[in-house]
Image (spheres, rainbow, N blue to C red):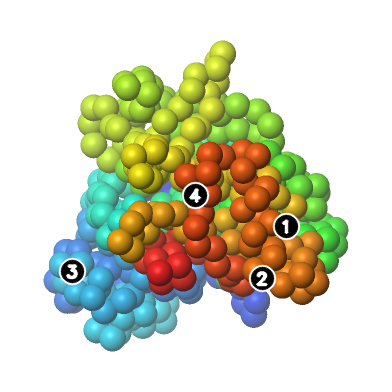
Amino acid sequence: MNSDQWMTYGDDHVVVTNNTADITVAQLKSHVASIQSCLSDNDIRSCAIFTEDTTLFIAAFLACVYTGVEVVLPANTAPQFVAKLDVDGWIGDFPQALAVDLLSLQMAEPRLLAKDSTVSLFTSGSTGEPKRIKRLVSQLLLEVRMLEQVWGQSLSFDRVGATVSHQHIYGLLFKIIWPLMRGTTVVGPIIPYESSLSQWLKIDQTLLLVASPAFLKRVCNEHQHQGKLCQVISSGGMLTSEQHVHASNMLQAPITQVYGSSETGGMASRESKGQWQWLPGVESKIENGVLWVQSPYCYQDGWHCTQDAIELNGDGFELLGRIDRIVKIEEYRVALSQVELALLQSDWIADAAVIKLSNNRQFLAAAVQLSESGRQQLQQNGEVHLKNQIKQDLLAHLDKKAIPKRMRFIDEALENSQGKRSQEQLQAWLS
């Protein structure tokens, strides 16, 4: 599967569908050719792309790939972050963006000038400082071929929609590259809410939904998802078995969770209550309880330390959490993921995030998103009573030293659209 096989289907095929218009292969080819011309005129060798416009993103991405220009996909456009990118071209939502005219070349054919190129992505990082990861386009195409091998043959879908951004590796693979390679129409706009999903399900075409755990945790009974939703793929974080089953029941579609990262690509997948199963091509080993992997999808050769602790069980495994999320509170070792899971045992809590803070002494702090029953308890009994009751209930699961000393009830989602939690945001909420 080479990069010269991106658009091998008919010119009338719809690549992207938007609220107001559809983009065909012929139109996309002209867009790609226009941007290629712009890249050549400005002698661009590395280009940052950031835009929610799916058509512009695909055209810019393919133009760079076809021309051999390094693609850089920042997670945001914060000025301090953008200033560190070290590129010579910009497309999308940047003050210094190239003036791209998608209509400058009508019915033009793009030129394939390079066999391979690189894509730079950024991890969220446990410290909040993004880390730049370079992946070869050929690696991404190899991973997409694996996705097609695992799911493409058993699933039949006309469109792919996503709640996640294509600026992230998960959205890039599942929303952009996989549909482009298999000839499936992409739903252009991000689907941020259930009400948005309901609108797309009214169309008489089968949809595969690429969702974040944050979206699936918010699924509720308020919307009737009557439509052809054939499958949900979720990545970027874990769902508990209860959250997985609840969302699947509400959406009336099976959910598959994918375990992976920007550095490693996809590593494993699982269904509702099943164990994680390795994806094809992934080799693994455990050293000191920590998972190491190597595969054709990794950004570097050899073994890669995932920083995740796992427990083998038969032909599968269980994820125990990141080793860098084990902290010491007064010399007592506490797994932050274990505290979060204990909080989620409460019917009053929809989601929770725990961090360690220091203020003369070290302690745990929890950002908590209440469920509907939790909000009712808050209205009836007040904040102090509810917090005390939650802490009291935690004693059934945790040592006293692991009980969060500080707790904040947060109305907004604890994860962003990519299913990631910002350490900076948690610090701001809880400090």
Q: Cα distance, mark 2 to mark 4? A: 31 Å
Identify which amino acid the numbered label 1 is placed on.
Trp
| Proximity of marks 1 and 2: CB atoms separated by less than 8 Å | no
CA distance for labels 2 and 3: 43 Å
Asked whether the viewer can see residue 396, the reply is yes
Which is in the foreground here, disc 2 or disc 3? 2
Q: Is residue 136 left or right of residue 248?
A: left
In the image, what residue type sits under mark 2? Glu
- Asked whether 246 or 270 is in front, the reply is 246
Q: Earlier in the sequence, mark 2 or mark 3?
A: 3
CA gap between label 4 and label 1 equals 24 Å
Q: Which residue is mark 4?
A: 236
Residue 275: x and y, percent? Answer: 60, 26
Location of the C terminus by quadrant is bottom left
Q: Which residue is mark 3?
A: 84
Determine whether the residue tagged by mark 2 lies in a helix, strand or loop. helix
- Identified by mark 3, the residue type is Lys
Q: Amino acid at mark 4?
A: Gly
Give how far apart the Cα atoms at labels 1 and 2 are. 13 Å
Tell me which numbered mark, 1 or 3, is placed earlier along the sequence. Answer: 3
Residue beneath the point at 65% across and 28% down? 274
Could one spot residue 200 in this view of the protein? Answer: no
Sequence-earlier tag: 1 or 2: 1
Q: Which residue is mark 2?
A: 383
Residue 103 is left or right of residue 300, and the answer is right
Q: Which mark is residue 348?
A: 1
| For marks 4 and 1 on the same chain, the one whose residue lies earlier in the sequence | 4
